[in-house]
């Protein structure tokens, strides 16, 4: 009898949610800040009634918290699809749904990480769940051989680890999940050696990346490196030496307008 009653309640709730997806829900709407890593997924499992609607969780960028029982930005419930005995819901901004009373496990997944927490939902109660998602902060400074900044000459920054990030400028205050990262930088046509750094939850680190062969001069609009300057000096010296040798060779030539002296003609004088 209990199983039949639960099945009937499940059918009614599913029908109500399907209708709610086409009609605005009563009450005020709520909004959350943009997600830190984009879309998040909330997964809810309910052992006694596994096919009920999920509690949907989105993470707040500023506070690192999450809240359930949120209505959609336009007043509509977020669409949810069931897979097996768990439910999945994704979205940006404010999403949410109602569930039957019971104990739920809520999981929020960010790239490379999953965070879970259990919540007890009581009848006729709006339950708010706070989930702390720890992050770390990376600052990257790019230097030449003389340890002078060449940030403005950087064309690519590739960060690999728990998340992969590709940027065109060195980041400041980049929020990432804790873990070990490898950083490669391209500047002035040269790629740096890989630099490895490990950051923990709530930790901020500044990483210096040296790109070898990029030392040069900033007086010109473009930054010629020392290697380029050396090649230019050697080329100029060779051209100068060639010109001087060519001029010396011309000076050593005999002028074709000067004739060799001719011997006297006629009978030789008799003593």
Image (cartoon, rainbow, N blue to C red):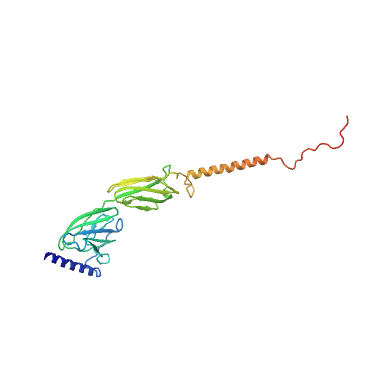
Q: Quadrant of residue 32?
A: bottom left
In the picture, measured across the screen, residue 172 lies left or right of residue 56, that is right
Residue positioned most to the top: 271
Vertical order, 165 against 81 (above or below): above
The percent position of residue 96, horizontal first and vertical second, equals: 23, 62
Q: Nearer the viewer, residue 129 or 193?
A: 193
In the picture, measured across the screen, residue 106 lies left or right of residue 171, that is left
Residue positioned most to the left: 1
Vertical order, 250 against 66 (above or below): above
Label total for image: 0
Give the quadrant of the N terminus: bottom left
Give the residue displayed 21% in from the left and 57% down from the top: 106
Q: Nearer the viewer, residue 165 or 127?
A: 165
Give the quadrant of the C terminus: top right
Give the residue displayed 67% in from the left and 40% down from the top: 251
The percent position of residue 64, horizontal first and vertical second, equals: 26, 54
The percent position of residue 192, horizontal first and vertical second, equals: 41, 46
The percent position of residue 199, horizontal first and vertical second, equals: 30, 47
Residue positioned most to the right: 270
Q: Quadrant of residue 104?
A: bottom left
């Amino acid at each position: 009898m209990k199983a039949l009653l639960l099945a009937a309640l499940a059918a009614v709730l599913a029908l109500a949610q399907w209708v709610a997806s086409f009609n605005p829900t009563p009450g005020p709407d709520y909004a959350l800040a943009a997600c830190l890593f984009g879309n998040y997924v909330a997964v809810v499992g309910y052992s006694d009634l596994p096919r009920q609607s999920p509690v949907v969780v989105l993470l707040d960028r500023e506070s690192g918290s999450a809240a359930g029982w949120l209505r959609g930005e336009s007043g509509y419930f977020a669409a949810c699809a069931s897979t097996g005995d768990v439910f999945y819901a994704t979205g940006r901004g404010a999403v949410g749904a109602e569930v039957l009373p019971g104990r739920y496990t809520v999981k929020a997944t960010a790239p490379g990480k999953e965070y879970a927490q259990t919540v007890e939902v009581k009848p006729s109660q709006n339950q708010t769940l706070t989930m702390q998602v720890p992050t770390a902060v990376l600052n990257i400074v790019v230097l030449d051989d003389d340890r002078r900044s060449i940030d403005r000459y950087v064309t690519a920054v590739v960060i690999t680890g728990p998340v992969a990030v590709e940027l065109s400028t060195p980041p400041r205050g980049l929020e990432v999940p804790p873990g070990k990262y490898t950083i490669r930088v391209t500047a002035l046509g040269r790629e740096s050696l890989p630099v490895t750094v490990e950051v923990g939850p709530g930790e901020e680190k500044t990483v210096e990346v040296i790109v070898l062969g990029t030392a040069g001069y900033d007086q010109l609009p473009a930054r010629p490196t020392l290697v380029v300057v050396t090649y230019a000096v050697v080329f100029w010296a060779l051209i100068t030496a060639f010109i001087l040798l060519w001029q010396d060779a011309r000076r050593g030539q005999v002028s074709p307008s000067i004739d060799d002296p001719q011997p006297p003609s006629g009978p030789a004088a008799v003593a």
